[in-house]
Image: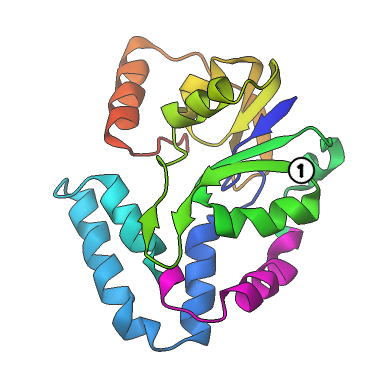
Amino acid sequence: MNVYDFDGTIFKSNSTVGFALWCILRHPKLWFTYCPGVLLALIQSKTGKIPEHKMLRKLFSFLTMIDDFEIQIERYWDKHEGDIAAWYLAQKREDDLIISASPDCIIAPIAKRLGVRYAATEYDREYGVFLNNLMYAKEKAHYIFDHGFPMIEGFYSDSLSDAPLALCAEKAYLVTKRATTVTDWPDMDAQTAKKVKRKINTGWNVHLK
């Protein structure tokens, strides 16, 4: 079984941000009901005033503000399904697992189109709350163990914050350059490992440029 992060790994951008922009353009009211609040949350998160899970809850909140979600998400993937990385499609297997911090309601439709399993952050679109922990960093590894998945042959991610899951795989790969370049997971020196540990504990993604 191979396991893949989604955003920036097999999909060239962030699907949550992309879908938010998609909905803003089609629902202009979001400029007033959504954008000011999420911009403030982003600033507060960057300056350490609020933890990332609160920022992400605000980021996801546009999902509670649109009444045609099912229509828009399918149209979004109609347009952006082609942004799935060619290298992934060439090696895709039926037993693949996509594991993502993005909301499950965004990941589920594309996983169905690809014909693979998925695990993502469970988010209630009616009440705007998380139904479980964010599917992020250590939580991805917890999910694999809690659900009794078999040995991971290969794990792919664009973020060093996924080191806990990378350590669970027989082989791990780092994906860079907008999901176009795949290299072996890097060995981390003490300073980098310390930085990654701090980022994991505070909820920030760590990327290699």
Q: Is residue 82 above or below residue 183?
A: below
Q: Position of residue 52 (x, y in %)?
A: 29, 46
Asked whether, in this view, residue 166 is left or right of residue 51, the answer is right
Residue 64 picture quarter: bottom left
Q: Nearer the viewer, residue 205 or 101?
A: 101
Residue 161 picture quarter: top left
View extreme (left): residue: 49
Asked whether, in this view, residue 37 is left or right of residue 159, the answer is left
Q: Which residues are magenta?
A: 63-82
* Mark 1: few/some/many CA within 10 Å (<14, 14-19, 20+): some
Q: Is residue 162 above or below residue 113?
A: above
Q: Position of residue 99 (x, y in %)?
A: 59, 38
Q: Is residue 175 above or below residue 178?
A: above
Q: In this rendering, does residue 174 appear at all? A: no
Total numbered badges shown on the rendered structure: 1
Give the labeled residue for mark 1.
116
Q: Nearer the viewer, residue 166 or 186?
A: 166
**Residue 14 painted magenta:** no
Position of the N terminus by quadrant? top right
Give the residue at x 57% y 15%.
Answer: 168
Give the residue at x 50% y 13%.
Answer: 187
Give the residue at x 45% y 55%.
Answer: 123
Q: Position of residue 94 (x, y in %)?
A: 84, 37
Dominant secondary structure (helix, strand or loop) of the stretch shown in magenta:
helix
Give the residue at x 57% y 48%.
Answer: 7
Q: Secondary structure at mark 1?
A: loop
Residue 68 picture quarter: bottom right
Q: Position of residue 145 (x, y in %)?
A: 55, 20
**Residue 75 painted magenta:** yes
Asked whether, in this view, residue 109 is left or right of residue 164, the answer is right
| Residue type at numbered disc 1 | Val
